[in-house]
Image (tube, rainbow, N blue to C red):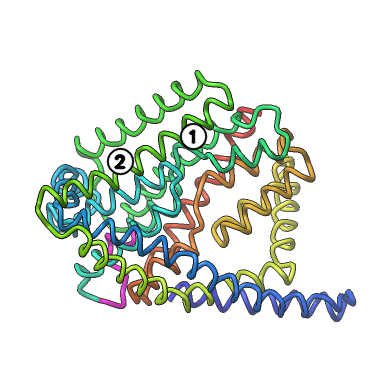
Amino acid sequence: MVLNYIWIAFFIVAFGIALFRLLLMGDVEVFPAMMNATFEQSKTAFEISLGLTGVLSLWMGVMKIGEKGGVVNLLARWLSPLFVRLFPDIPKGHPVTGSIFMNIAANMLGLDNAATPLGLKAMEQLQELNPHKERASNPMIMFLVLNTSGLTLIPVSIMVYRAQMGAVQPTDIFIPILLATCCSTVAGILITAAYQRINLLNKVMVGALGGLVLLVALAIWGFGQLDKEEMNVMSSSVANVLLMSLIVSFILAGVRKRINVYEAFIEGAKDGFATAVRIIPYLVAILVGIGVFRASGAMDVLVDVVAQTVKVCGGDTQFVPALPTALMKPLSGSGARGMMVDAMTTYGADSFVGRLSCIFQGSTDTTFYILAVYFGSVGIRQTRHAVPCGLLADLAGIIAAIAIAYLFF
């Protein structure tokens, strides 16, 4: 229901601003730009789904091998003490906990192509436990907020963009991004737990959060010992080794269980193809709405309003030129990436605005894209508190990114 209102708002606000620009400013290009955006974004949505088909088929096939080989059940048993508290509605030891863990691990390593199929597999398993098939369950919402908060330990792509844009030290945003993304993730967990009345004050959860902080600290220390080239090589190598190790371990587990590994892969791959086709309408809807909103100039108006509000309150407006990246990120990952590159091109890769836009890009994930794809893959229509929880986590990440950027730069 919330997505319905937001989608309608995209068009109504965009149309109103475009009409204003046409009648009072004589901007005859605004409506053609909006119509072009509808066609371009429809094409983009289909291309994304088409591009996902192979990746989804691959990873859902691998997941099916892991499921039949017992790996997913093993992970579920190991994580049961933690997940039974974070996801109290999931039965203890259910295989979905293993799928959730692997999706989160892929996100933390920046393995987007692997994370999405793993996440869609987890959503299918969560839907099996969902008593109301068109209404999002509490575990679904908590899982999606963990995704939208964008916890990433190794932001390789952002560092590569900074190197390409001529940054003297492309890795100087590594620690700020790590801190900002941790803030958004912790905020997302706390906010969603408050909505769902989940008690996090127990030894297991406190120990898990403490372990997360320790892991982040070790990652910061370890990568801090490397120069920019060594860091990029090491991070990408570690990610790829772990990914290939995961595939091989699933295959070996299948061999050990004496299952037909090839047939299990084909069975899962067929599900991946079906899922890719199923999400096309949802992607078209959300990306067209975003494209129209952006083409109308509504995003620029929103940024100007924020700038004027900050100025009236006596605050420093130095961060405002980087805001388009933050505002675009919940709507479109590629759009936010374009905003980040534009900020570095306009102000310089090593400017405060350039660095802050990179921190914005790495601190959260594409909330509406994830909601559209993940909920659309299982036919969820009533999103309940998923949107406000996801957006509040994004807001926490934005505020943290601004504060951290002022602290570091």
- Relative to 71, 220 lies left or right: right
Residue tagged 2: 245
2 vs 1, front mark: 2
Quarter of the figure with residue 348 = top right
Q: Nearer the viewer, residue 245 or 290?
A: 245
Q: Residue extending furthest top? A: 225
For label 1, the residue is 179
- x then y, percent, for residue 128: 21, 70
Q: Residues within 10 Å of mark 1 (few under 14, many from 20)?
A: many
Instruction: Tell me the CA gap for discs 2 and 1.
Output: 28 Å
Q: Name the residue rendered at 51%, 76% in the picture.
A: 5
Q: Amino acid at mark 1?
A: Leu
Give above or below for 212 relative to 334.
Answer: above
**Tag 2 secondary structure:** helix
> Which quarter of the figure is the C terminus placed in?
top right
Measuring 70% from the left and 32% from the top, which residue is drawn there? 167
Return the mark for residue 24. Answer: none
**Magenta run includes residue 16:** no
Left or right: 228 in relation to 36: left
At 74% from the left and 40% from the top, the residue drawn is 318
Q: Is residue 137 magenta?
A: yes
Q: Is 357 displayed left or right of 206 in the figure?
A: right
Residue drawn at 39 percent across, 66 percent down = 374
- The percent position of residue 112, horizontal first and vertical second, equals 45, 51
Magenta segment boundaries in residue numbering: 133-141
Question: In the rendered image of this protein, does residue 205 appear above or below residue 6?
Answer: above
**Amino acid type indicated by mark 2:** Ser
